[in-house]
Image (cartoon, helix red, strand yellow):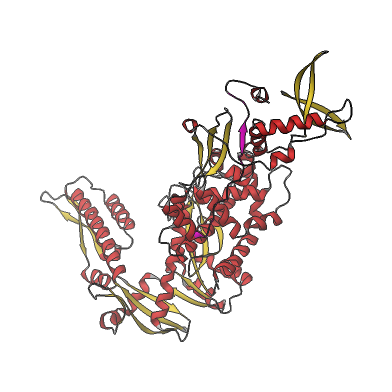
Amino acid sequence: MFLRSTVVKKGGKTYRYWKLVETVRTTAGPRQRVVAHLGDLAHFTAADWETLAHRLGEPALTAALERRVRQGGRKGRPPKWTLQDRVRAAPDAVTIRLGETAWRHPLPCGDVYAGLVLWQRLGLGALLAEKLAPSRAEVPWATIAALIAVNRLVDPMPEWRMVRWWRTTALPPLLGLPVALVDDNRLYRCLDAVLPHKAAIEEHLAGRGQTLFGQSYRFLLYDLTSTYFEGQVPHNPKAKRGYSRDRRPDCKQVCIGAVVDREGFPVGYEVVAGNVKDHQTVAGMLDRLRTRFGLTDRTLCMDRGLVTADSLQVIRGAQVAYVLADRRDAAAAYAAQVAAGPWQVIRTDRKTGQAMVEIQEVGREEGDRLILVRSQGCREKEQGIHNRLLTRLTSALERLARTVRNGRLVNPAKIERRIGRILARHPGLARWVCVRREEVTAEHGKVRSVVHWHVKEEAEALARQLEGVYLLRTNVEGTPAAQVWEDYVTLVRVEEAFRTLKHDLHLRPICHHWERRTEAHILFAWIAYAMYWVLERTHRRHGGTLTGRRVLELLHGITLGTISLTTVQGLKLELERISTPRPEEAAVLHSLRITLPRPKRRLDRVDLTLPEDRDLFESQQL
């Protein structure tokens, strides 16, 4: 037996129909007889092919075929009968050779699938499908955006490397994208397409935060960070050298002003030039918040770097409630209150009972309540910094004095410059020391310079007394001073957001040189941070204790692979399946409320080629 195809052209289209044909002996010689019409097999699934191949080898089907042939039809015409309906009802049972079973081509699936679920929960796919113009290519922009966001969440890397990475994951079958349709050009064009919708994305994320987690945005935290570039970045006017939080003053940078709520959920951000002072961004941030939310019934919290006399006037003019940390030296005006008290203990060490945080309200200034805070943790930190810097400063001054005394440096102007450089390297402790150059007469009447220095005891004592002490100011009335401090320390949430962006989501360094690509890179990092926040919060809401990065590392172990089987008849079967999660992986999936995709009921792919015979139907004895 063998297959024969017939081509029919109708209405400008071509159709191919298949028949099952056998060779029989007649008195007139060998003749070919059609056993059955198989119809159009172009749309046969892999499961249909496997079932057809299996059923054709059964004796019962051979007898049924023989009866149908004997019934015949009109003279000269083959019987009108098809196997298609019978094939679809066939069972999924085959006999396989266990020794030839294999698990091939495993691809990481759990982490990227979780990223796609988070993308859907935040509704970003639907938003971008609505906002972005249809692409002339076969791949929608929203799908490419999902790919970039999932990469930024799971395994952040530049777009040129992302092209190779996504092929090694389960994203192609999960997204339904042919690998050949995605290249680095598509990824870069997607950045350009998504960036104009930054404001809509921020607004949408804020709305999803209210829907999913009940975020109210009544208490907002604002702070700045910086991220640096690789290269000279000549085409980005915002790339400037300035104060680097990454300790890379040699690189150009941009600054990012971010607003989050008291739980760290992203509210909005803005990219500004890398040399902009922190306090210069306050007015623009207030204007954007007023446009989006209104400032009525909002409380704004900021750290001391954003508070100057000018920015404080801007904040007061905005008619917004605020909790601010005043500049570092502001507490020195209240040295007497620091020494005398009375201090109210609001937090103690559980083991020793030692006071860890103390507060006292010391008065008012231009309508603001002033609250002194003394923190043992801050004191230990500042004490360590002071000791380290003081050791460096005194060592540098002693080396300079010894160099001058030994006659290796005699020029008075150079000595003065060396003193100035040493003090400039230690600006925080320069007021602690007194340094002077004197001219003395040697034994032979020669005049030489001598450097004298000492630590001013009063200045050091005052600084030591104020270690760990800082001043808060607020215009919120009726709130206990302890609650004001509790509100202020929530600023750690925005610091955690910056740490997640830089370390877990690899915001830095930026390799894009164009301004629009830089801002698109930061936008996708911001989207990935929202996904990361939802991942971690959902996990912990349902009893989890892991960080978001550890959750993704566990899910990385769930893979999508191909089970390769060989039947006793020699058929090669391939089934795409997701590995069964281990107990810890299953627990994480349960905490995230994520269910893995169910496998198809039928076999996915069947190779009809037999090892010993190319023709399947000739190998069957009908």
Q: How far from the left and from the top, in percent, is residue 331?
A: 35, 75
* Image quarter of the C terminus: top right
Judging depth in this view, the residue of 193 and 224 nearest the camera is 193
The magenta region covers: 592-610
Task: Tell me the residue at 87%/33% (across/down).
Answer: 12
On the image, which quarter does residue 362 sit in?
bottom left
On the image, which quarter does residue 79 sit in?
top right
Judging depth in this view, the residue of 516 and 105 nearest the camera is 105
Task: Tell me the residue at 79%/23% (across/down).
Answer: 33
- Indicate yes or no whether the magenta region holds residue 609: yes
Q: Is any part of residue 238 visible from this angle?
A: no
Judging depth in this view, the residue of 311 and 567 nearest the camera is 567
Judging depth in this view, the residue of 554 and 132 nearest the camera is 554
Q: Position of 392 compared to 524: left or right?
A: left
SS majority, magenta: loop
Q: How far from the left and from the top, in percent, is residue 38?
A: 76, 33
Is 463 drawn above or below residue 175 in the view shown? below
Task: Tell me the residue at 67%/55% (across/down).
Answer: 128
Q: How far from the left and from the top, in percent, is residue 134?
A: 73, 49
Q: Position of 582 compared to 120: left or right?
A: left
Is 297 drawn above or below residue 86 in the view shown? below
Task: Tell me the residue at 80%/17% (across/down).
Answer: 31
Is 229 drawn above or below residue 377 in the view shown? above
- Indicate yes or no whether the magenta region holds residue 535: no
Q: Is any part of residue 160 visible from this angle?
A: yes
Is 566 drawn above or below residue 30 in the view shown? below
